[in-house]
Amino acid sequence: MSLARHRTVLTAYAIALLLFAVGTLHSLDFAAPSQLKTMLVYASFIGIIGLGQTLCILTGGIDLSVPWTLTGAAVLTSVMTAEGRPLGVAIALVLALALVVGLLNGIGVAYAGVPPIIMTLGMNGALQGLLLVYTDGGISANPPQGLTDFVLGDTLGLPTQLWIWAAVIALGCALLSLTTFGRRLYAIGANRRAAELAGVRARRVLVAPYVISALGAAVTGLLVMGFTGQAFLTMGDPYLFSSAVAVAVGGASILGGSGHYAGTVAGALVLTLVASLLPLFSLGTAWLQIAYGLILLAAVYAAGLNVTRKKRGSPDA
């Protein structure tokens, strides 16, 4: 990636390094190996779910069904294994359901013309209602031990979780940088009509990001459950804004057409570092929500300015 083209991505990594330096100067324990591993694991949750969100945002959309797709995957797996179903069967069923959710979102956006915010927010509400009916408003099952052992295990000295994220990073970067699918996503996000005139089957391409997003949310739900040792009905709430904010921090345009998953990785690190710094400065989690809101507002404002420059034909657009 060229320096000029991806300066926003590099800026995001610079911010992450700055935040890490601030934490280390405030407390040497901030840079302890155990602390680093923990922060990276928490960043991986945002990062894995952020792949699909990145693809959606690149096309000018967004996936707001992430919270209850994530929660549903964890809760249903927990309940099914408690009822005696093998873990592998439960995971396969959950991923199949996530695939259906992604297809419905994608078809609604691409073929029915429903705005992404409306389609995915409606899906999120529907999933919430269905899950509350299925569990009678509560859950008492414990996470499967096999999943917990897998997620908390180490491979070559690093948590298994981080190797999974490394694989997702390699997949996401290759998908956007080396494939025609990635180029089509950028083309659709920049100008869908022009992309269609150039021969891109936009509707088919638009379905894929929502499928990937739903599958990523389901996988993240399983990993969060295995790491925390519990499944509960609000576990997906923190990822509604964090996944989108990570994409914005990474330099992607919230209106589509520009950005990269490498930036989302940096965004996930930045958000995790900010959350880790709050206790050091005796600040509550409310400040994290304030930061999320301000970042999203800034991202929308910056995207609007860029659109205005392009319409005016500014040379620095």
Image (spheres, rainbow, N blue to C red):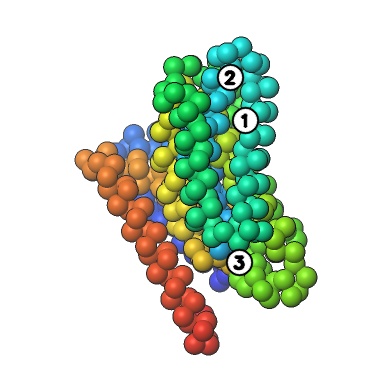
Q: Which residue is found at the position 44% from the left and 53% from the top? A: 245
Q: Is residue 134 above or below residue 58?
A: above
Nearest to N terminus: mark 3 or mark 1:
1
In the image, residue 73 lies at what x, y percent? Answer: 55, 31
In the image, residue 155 lies at what x, y percent? Answer: 61, 26
Asked if disc 2 and disc 1 are in contact, CB closer than 8 Å, the reply is yes
Q: Evaluate whether residue 78 shows in this view.
A: yes
> Along the horizontal axis of the image, is 138 left or right of 164?
left
Of all residues, the one furthest to the left in this rendering is: 282
When asked about the image quadrant of residue 76, the answer is: top right
In the image, residue 165 lies at what x, y percent? Answer: 59, 39
For disc 2, the marked residue is: 80
Taking depth in this image into account, of 149 and 192 the one nearest to the observer is 192
For disc 3, the marked residue is: 189
Crowding at dot 1, Cα within 10 Å, few <14 / some 14-19 / many 20+, comes out as many
Nearest to N terminus: mark 2 or mark 1:
2
For disc 1, the marked residue is: 94
Q: Which residue is found at the position 58% from the left and 13% from the top? A: 83
Q: Label 1 amino acid? A: Val
Q: What secondary structure is found at the residue carrying circle 2?
A: helix
Q: Label 2 amino acid? A: Met
Q: Evaluate whether residue 57 shows in this view.
A: no
Taking depth in this image into account, of 181 and 83 the one nearest to the observer is 83
Asked if disc 3 and disc 2 are in contact, CB closer than 8 Å, the reply is no
Measure how far apart labels 3 and 1 are at the Cα level: 30 Å
Measure how far apart labels 2 and 1 are at the Cα level: 10 Å
Q: Is residue 65 above or below residue 33?
A: below
In the image, residue 297 lies at what x, y percent? Answer: 37, 62
The tally of labels here is 3
Nearest to N terminus: mark 3 or mark 2:
2
